[in-house]
Image: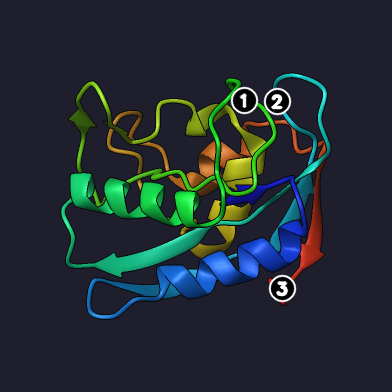
C-alpha cells in the first residue's frame, strides 16, 4: 500500500479497513507504516505498508478488487510512478506465477525495492519467491535501506 497525496496516513488506515472484507478478504497481518523517498518524478515522500490477506478471490479477481478500492479513494493514473492518493499492488499470490497482459505475479519489481521488502519482511520474512527461490528476508538484506524510515503502526 502506498500514498503521497492528501492525508496519506488516514487514507492508508481507511484502505486497510476496506481490505478487511470477510469472507472475500481478511487481513491476516499488517506491517508498520514507512516513509519512503519516491521513485519517479519530483513528488512528496510516500507512506508505504504491506498487508497479508487471506482471500477466496482468484488472483485476477483480487486485482480487480484492489483497483476498485484505489478508485474509491480517488486514484487517477496520469503519470507513471507519479503521485497517488492510494496505490495497492498485488505482490504475490501464494506461490503462483502469473503472467498476463494485466497482471504479473510475483510483482516484477518487488525484489529491488527496499520500500516494499522492508515492510514485507515484517509480516512474511520466510515467504519464498517462486522465481528466485530466495526468502523475503534474504531479498531484503540485499537492498539499500536508505530512504526508508519506519514511522510506527498504521493509525487513523
Question: Which numbered disc, 3 or 2, marks the residue that appears first in the sequence?
Answer: 2
Label 1, label 3: how far apart the Cα atoms are: 25 Å
Q: Which residue is mark 1?
A: 81
Label disc, if present, on residue 115 of the rendered structure: none
Quadrant of the frame with the C terminus:
bottom right
Q: Whole-percent x and y of residue 99? A: 21, 25
Task: Please tell me which residue lies in front, 70 or 97.
Answer: 70
Residue 150 vs 84, above or below: the answer is: below
Residue 127 seen anywhere in this rendered image of the structure: no
| Residue 20 location (% of width, % of height) | 40, 75
- Residue found 42% across the figure and 68% down from its top: 19
- Distance in Å between CA atoms under marks 2 and 1: 6 Å
Q: Which residue is mark 3?
A: 153
Q: Residue at x 51, y 64 (%)?
A: 123
Image position of 82 (left or right of 26): right
Horizontal placement of 62 versus 48: left or right? left
Where residue 67 sits in the image (x, y, percent)? Answer: 39, 46
Mark 1 falls on what kind of element? loop
Which quadrant of the figure has residue 69? Answer: bottom left
Q: Secondary structure at mark 2?
A: loop
Is residue 130 or residue 30 the one in the foreground?
Answer: 30
Amino acid at each position: 500500500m502506498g500514498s503521497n497525496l492528501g492525508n496519506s496516513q488516514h487514507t492508508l488506515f481507511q484502505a486497510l479497513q476496506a481490505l478487511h472484507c470477510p469472507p472475500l478478504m481478511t487481513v491476516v497481518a499488517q506491517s508498520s507504516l514507512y516513509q519512503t523517498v519516491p521513485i519517479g518524478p519530483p513528488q512528496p515522500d510516500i507512506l508505504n505498508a504491506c498487508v497479508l490477506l487471506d482471500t477466496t478471490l482468484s488472483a485476477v479477481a483480487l486485482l480487480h478488487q484492489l483497483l476498485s478500492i484505489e478508485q474509491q479513494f480517488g486514484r487517477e493514473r496520469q503519470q507513471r510512478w507519479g503521485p497517488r492518493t492510494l496505490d495497492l499492488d498485488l505482490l504475490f499470490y501464494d506461490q503462483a506465477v502469473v503472467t498476463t497482459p494485466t497482471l504479473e505475479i510475483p510483482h516484477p519489481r518487488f525484489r529491488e525495492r527496499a520500500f516494499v521488502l522492508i515492510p514485507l519482511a515484517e509480516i512474511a520474512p520466510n515467504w519464498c519467491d517462486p522465481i528466485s527461490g530466495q526468502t523475503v528476508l534474504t531479498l531484503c538484506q540485499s537492498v539499500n535501506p536508505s530512504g526508508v524510515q519506519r514511522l510506527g503502526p498504521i493509525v487513523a
